[in-house]
Amino acid sequence: MADQVFQPLPTVPDHPSLEEEVLAVWEQEGTFEALREQNAGGPSYSFFDGPVTANKSLGVHTAWGRTLKDVFQRYKALRGFDQRYQNGFDCQGLWIEVGVERELGLNSKREIEEYGLEEFARKCRDVVVWSSSELIAGSKRLGQWMDWGNDYYTFSDTNIEYVWRMLKTVNERDWLYLGHRATEWCPRCGTSISQHELGMSGVYQDKADPSLFVRFPLIERAGESLVIWTTTPWTLPANVAAAVNPDAEYGLRENGEWVAVARYPDDTFVTRTRGADMVGWRYRGPFDELVEVAHRVIPWDEVSLDEGTGIVHIAPGCGGEDFELSQLHDLQVVMPVDESGRFYDTFGWLKRLSTVEATDQIVGYLAGKGLLAEAGLYQHRYPHCWRCDTPLIFRIADDWFISVRDLRPQMLDANGTVEWTPKYMGKRMDDWLRNMGDWNISRRRYYGLPLPFYPCACGHLNVIGSRAELEERAIEGIDQLEELRRPWIDRVPIRCEKCGERVDRIAEVGDVWLDAGVVPFSTLGWQNPKWIPQGYATGAARGLTTADLPDHAYWEKWFPADWVSEMREQIRLWFYSQLFMSVVLVGRAPFQRVLGYEKMLDEEGREMHGSWGNMIETSDAFPRMGADVMRWLYCAQPPDRNLLFGFGPADAVKREVLTMWNSVKFFVDYANIEEFRPSWSALNLEGDLEPLDRWLVERTHAFVRDAESGYETYLTVDVMRAYQEFVDDLSNWYIRRSRRRFWKGDDDAAFQTLWYALVQSLRVMAPILPFMTDHLWRTLVLDGPSSVHLAGWPEVPDPDLPLLDEIDDVRRVVTLAHQARAAAGLKLRQPLRRLVVEGAPSVAAHADEIADEVRVKEIEFGPVEAELRVKPNLPALGPRLGKELRTVQHALQAGEFEELPGGRFRAAGHELEPDEVLVERLGREGFAVSSTDGVTVALDTGLDEDLVLEGRVLDLIRQVNTMRKEQGLEITDRIVLTVPNEAEPLLRWEDRIKSEVLAVEIRVDGDLAVERAT
Ligand SMILES: [Zn+2]
Ligand SMILES: [Zn+2]
């Protein structure tokens, strides 16, 4: 066996071990380096990698995006494009901090400061070092080809300086300001959360909160109270007003409670009044002994009459709209809790309690004072911190903002130049741009981009734009400045450029999306005069990467990106922050095309959570599924729908992969017997091809074209569909129909054609299934490019579409005949007398093939006598036709309709689409009829003795061939066959049996037996 032409393949591939082997070969041969060299100087294709947060190992979620990135880079590489292949890591911000806090058991900002910011910063960097190496290892195992080792890390000083520069520009244009406003706040993280972060998945979760109806006693109206409703009891101590809808009617119940009449239509009211007339009423707040506030009723058009009592409790220190109302009505702003969400010391018995701890006590206190009208529980969707899952609260804070007023129209214009797949995601971006508020860029944290703001007592805001500028203006501390980072940078005061006094930096760090948004500038050397080798490996990134800081010419070449791709959630995050910065700096979009995709869920459609036990780690997925199978699942997924991922779907894919695998194995097994030796130059097919061979060649060309169109429109799902149809044609038509030619051997055209189709399709699928295709390529291609990834995209002529349509029709007739046979309950091995075909004239030339395939003695072309019954498909047709439905239904019932091309019908003046009708054809007695797309077949189901006997012969042949396999015989082994006495009549077909089972002799005696002939 050693001198076989092709390495034999096992029956079933072991994906994980096959992939490990291929990875080793790539490593050893330097396949990726060879590819880059091959494409160097070619046309450029620019892709920016969205940085993955470096705080974890590779998850199956991240692997989805990484696969798509890899697929299109590989496709473009096959087409000769030169690419950058730079991978990126997001290295700062709360995600990293929270992990370190957990690891160190720190529970508050105070504990972090006690632990020490220097050591804390080093621990954060350790996480990034660990995670980035894990992510690189996982991505390599996935088959992703990137320029590993030249990755960008957003915590590099270079990246930070680029953000500084952008912020300086923003300040010069007067867009930067310090805002005093209500903001969503995480009490655990001690920082505000910005609007775009609220859009992240998992932020809104179901939560049960107390539902309290509370009385506010009116001062001038003894015995009467306003009743308000709240689900956040901790905000009551901060109450300053009660809002009523001025146009609504309010009523006084007998028990002295005021509520909106519309909320309680069945109640009896002693008296009624309009909301407008209640404005100015004064009342006593429930916590007046703790906080001195004058409470009064204010008007507010937005007061809802759909929930609560129609009277709304207003606490400007704890709510966004409340705060705006306080500006409008000149209300006092009471801030009850500090940045860790605990009551200030001035709040008496509430002091130091968290908002959660305070709840029960507040409820008890209200009840004790007789102020609680009703208490219960309320289920609602409530925002949680995206990093630590703590329920958010509202606080008033001073945060730094970038005004979007001037930028909004420019960003909308810029987004108008971007082509989005799927299209609706571009509309989501437009919606977001239209509705976004000013960008809150400051966070009260530690391990993040230090905001370069130095507000001076003289009123001037100094904004530093680079490290050089900082060094120039620093008063002290430059020597100890290890990185542009807290705590080191906090020890570098500067001189005010206005008054010359000493100024300190504010303590805040920046929103992480600043770090990621500047990447199209910082990694490409925008406005950098001279190329700096390893110039990106600065600050915390030193030692982790060897990435250069290129010069401006390089930026000109690679900006904007031809394509970027991330999940939908990134519309408000990375896609937005990049667009934002790009519009600020150069006035246009940083990318031309975007591919977005929806969420990943488990195979039952539930979110994946570590705590639910349904999370799949790649460390589990790689050995159990293999990377190719994972990539198949990712690529077969339409991007506008959630991906249901799991081991069940993976097993189904493993079975599907076999069709291609078996086709190659079939070729290899027979080509080895025949010692057929293809040469790379034979990729240009020449010589005498049979019609079926010519068809397969054209079919292959059509597949190449279909896949091309899928790749060019960034829809891997289209490539996968084209592939599945092609492989079905290849295996279930070409190979099935040609089997005999391979058995007989000595038919170079068959071998040549099959080899051609296999080799070309491997090239097409190489971007999606990089391991299996390369393995099979290395099996099949003896003297061509060493790897499928170096073989380029197949250049093929346009396919012969009429020929393809003709065979499509043939396959359609065969499928219909099989359907008719199944409907009549006749098994496939039972020969039948006749098939009548109507409506597929082009298949006449293939009558013999069809007869053979569907096992009938004769094919007849002509009208099929069948009664056509058409019924309306009510769920589809009802909504469209409305009252007309009955008329159409009667017409169809009475047979008054006309058949139109494409499976459509006309009845009572209406044209009905194929999915709007249910079609049934009843054949003549003795015929089974089936029909689709204008083709109808009728199968003669009558049997006679001859047909029955022949059916038994075919059963016997199948049985013997199964026995051959079970006994482990080689496909070339000859046998002696023994058949039982009752099978003797079958020997009328002795020659046929012998040739089909490779028997040299048939004996009649005892039990059925197979023996290798000697
Ligand atoms: Zn948090
Ligand atoms: Zn000053």
Image (tube, rainbow, N blue to C red):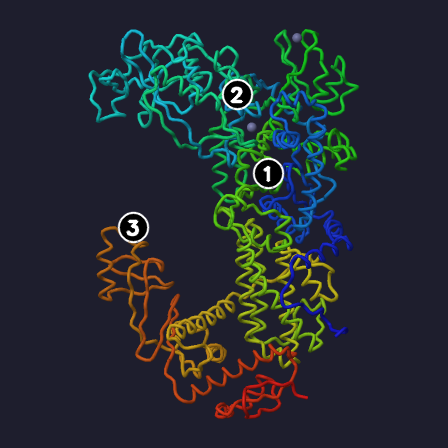
Instruction: Please tell me whether residue 388 is drawn above or below residue 116 in the rendered image.
Output: below
Question: In the picture provided, is 415 more to the left or to the right than 322?
Answer: right
Contact (CB < 8 A) between labels 2 and 1?
Answer: no
Residue 353 percent coordinates (x, y): 51, 19
Contact (CB < 8 A) between labels 3 and 2?
Answer: no
Mark 2 lies on a secondary structure that is: loop
Question: Crowdedness of circle 1 by 10 Å Cα count: few (<14), some, many (20+)?
Answer: many
Q: Which residue is mark 2?
A: 341
Question: Crowdedness of circle 3 by 10 Å Cα count: few (<14), some, many (20+)?
Answer: few
**In the rendered structure, which disc, 1 or 3, sits on the residue that comes first in sequence?**
1
Mark 1 lies on a secondary structure that is: loop
Q: Which residue is mark 1?
A: 591
Residue 697 percent coordinates (x, y): 59, 68
**Which residue shows up at 39% across the image and 70% down it?**
935
**In the rendered structure, which disc, 2 or 1, sits on the residue that comes first in sequence?**
2
Instruction: Please tell me whether residue 425 is drawn above or below residue 124 in the rendered image.
Output: below
**In the rendered structure, which disc, 3 or 2, sits on the residue that comes first in sequence?**
2
Q: Quadrant of the rendered structure where residue 378 is?
A: top left
Instruction: Please tell me whether residue 100 is drawn above or below residue 299 in the rendered image.
Output: below
Q: Tag on residue 879? A: 3
Instruction: Please tell me whether residue 279 is drawn above or below residue 210 in the rendered image.
Output: above
Question: In the picture provided, is 986 more to the left or to the right than 310?
Answer: right
Mark 3 lies on a secondary structure that is: helix
Question: Crowdedness of circle 2 by 10 Å Cα count: few (<14), some, many (20+)?
Answer: many
409, 109: nearer the viewer: 109
**Which residue shows up at 61% across the image and 62% down it?**
761
Distance between the alpha carbons at the discs numbered 2 and 1: 41 Å
Pointer 2 residue Cβ closer than 8 Å to ligand 1: no
Residue 579 percent coordinates (x, y): 57, 32
Q: Identity of the amino acid at label 2? A: Gly
- Give ligand 1's quarter of the image: top right
Q: Quadrant of the rendered structure where residue 900 is?
A: bottom left
